Image: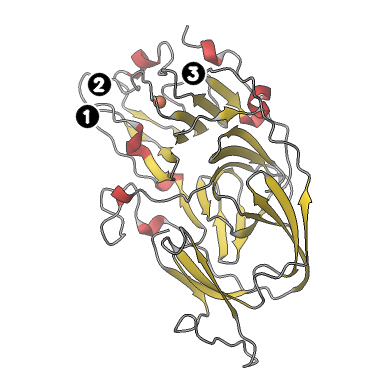
């Protein structure tokens, strides 16, 4: 996150003595830094040692549902057909994976007191349905439909939902950070006037009273495809204050300001975040191209270096037939794709679209999992006939 934020109490000068109210016990300073010491960082002040762990054990988790014989095809699956439920950790089901990116969905039906830390990647959490709060040592991020929360790698967090009847998340894990593209910023890091968003619509964590409870607290630590249970002797959110540029932040898809052109503009104009190996875009309601003979639907294209994934959120998607809220489509990089029969003609003269969707373009091919096989639209691959 390119914006400085601070909460709670911190010493005026970093790396100096900072005592608890008893006047003799030090708060424990922790520097959380990215890209070695060259990326964004924050400094947190803990009541207890952030390194204290009472026990560690590896958890046996079902394999990653690999579907090695998945054919080279166009895919469409209805993620809402998945039966899997659970809490914000256990409900996750992987749909598309490669070595640096994992796209999963979660229908959350339980709250849990367990904490979660992804030590192997940053997470982007799209709140499709549901409201609640994400708690971390940095504070609390309230969330609701359309919110996109970025949780930096190695952040211990917990999500609590207000109502357990209708919660749906789409989660992208990345082994590199989700970042605002450089061309949206000026040389001082401020968002430029032509960026699709401004600083004021990003939501940093709100203050959370430090929790100094002692006892046994369970954290599930994910390290790539291995899971561990850490029992720690104090509440993980015993932080009296922090400052810096690295923290969970929220941006709502409805705050994304789209660009429109006289003729069709390609997906990079919808860019939200980039990582080292893929990009995330927001498709939102917008006016269509205004040339008198414009074809608003996209042309057929072969994006030879990228797999293209769309997660459909809301509204009618102008170039696709049969997709529903919660659908995922995958168009592999080695194959051409484009509007289905009739969609190109239908788009001519149309003035606007009301669609909401999240697009993920990865530079490495994605592998569909058995969850795709189980929820697949079998007719999709032949829907251009
Ligand atoms: Fe495409």
Report the Cα–Cα distance between label 2 and label 1: 7 Å
Q: Residue at x 22, y 18 (%)?
A: 293
Near mark 3 (Cα within 10 A), the count class, few <14, some 14-19 or many ≥20, is: some
SS of the residue under disc 2: loop
State which tag comes first along the sequence, 3 or 2: 2
SS of the residue under disc 3: loop
- The answer to whether residue 103 is above or below residue 186 is above
Q: Residue at x 46, y 34 (%)?
A: 362
Q: Mark 2 — residue? A: 294
Q: Position of residue 230 (x, y in %)?
A: 74, 60
Q: Indicate left or right for 131 with 261 as reference.
A: right
SS of the residue under disc 1: loop
Q: Mark 3 — residue? A: 321
Using the image as rendered, state which of residue 249 and residue 355 is in the foreground: 249
Report the Cα–Cα distance between label 3 and label 1: 25 Å
Q: Position of residue 298 (x, y in %)?
A: 35, 22
Disc number for residue 262: 1
Q: Are marks 3 and 2 in contact (CB under 8 Å)?
A: no
């Amino acid at each position: 996150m390119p914006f400085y934020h601070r909460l709670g109490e911190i010493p005026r000068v970093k790396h100096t003595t900072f005592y608890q109210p008893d006047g003799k016990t030090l708060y424990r300073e922790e520097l959380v830094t990215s890209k070695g010491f060259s990326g964004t960082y924050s400094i947190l002040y803990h009541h207890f040692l952030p390194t204290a762990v009472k026990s560690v054990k590896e958890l046996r988790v079902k394999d990653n549902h690999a579907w090695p014989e998945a054919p080279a095809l166009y895919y469409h699956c209805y993620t809402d057909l998945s039966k899997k439920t659970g809490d914000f950790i256990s409900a996750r089901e992987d749909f598309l994976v490669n070595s640096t990116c994992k796209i999963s969905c979660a229908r959350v039906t339980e709250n849990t007191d367990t904490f979660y830390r992804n030590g192997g990647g940053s997470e982007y959490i799209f709140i499709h349905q549901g409201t609640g709060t994400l708690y971390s040592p940095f504070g609390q991020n309230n969330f609701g439909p359309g919110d996109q929360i970025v949780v930096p790698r190695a952040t211990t967090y917990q999500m609590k939902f207000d109502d357990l009847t209708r919660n749906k998340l789409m989660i992208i894990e990345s082994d590199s950070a989700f970042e605002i593209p450089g061309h949206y910023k000026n040389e001082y890091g401020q968002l430029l006037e032509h960026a699709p968003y401004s600083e004021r619509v990003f939501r940093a964590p709100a203050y959370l009273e430090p929790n100094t409870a002692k006892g046994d607290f369970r954290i599930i630590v994910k390290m790539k495809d291995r899971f561990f249970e850490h029992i720690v002797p104090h509440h993980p959110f015993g932080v009296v204050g922090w400052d810096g540029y690295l923290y969970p932040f929220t941006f709502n898809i409805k705050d994304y300001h789209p660009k429109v052109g006289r003729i069709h503009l390609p997906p990079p104009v919808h860019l939200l975040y980039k990582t080292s190996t893929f990009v995330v875009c927001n498709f939102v309601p917008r006016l269509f191209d205004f040339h008198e003979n414009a074809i608003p639907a996209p042309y057929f294209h072969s994006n030879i270096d990228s797999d293209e994934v769309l997660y459909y959120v809301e509204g009618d998607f102008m170039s696709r037939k049969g997709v529903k809220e919660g659908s995922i489509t995958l168009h592999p990089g080695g194959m051409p794709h484009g509007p289905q029969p009739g969609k190109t003609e239908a788009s001519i003269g149309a003035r606007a679209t009301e669609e909401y969707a999240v697009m993920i373009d990865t530079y490495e091919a994605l592998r569909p999992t058995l969850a795709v096989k189980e929820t697949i639209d079998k007719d999709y691959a032949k829907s251009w006939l």
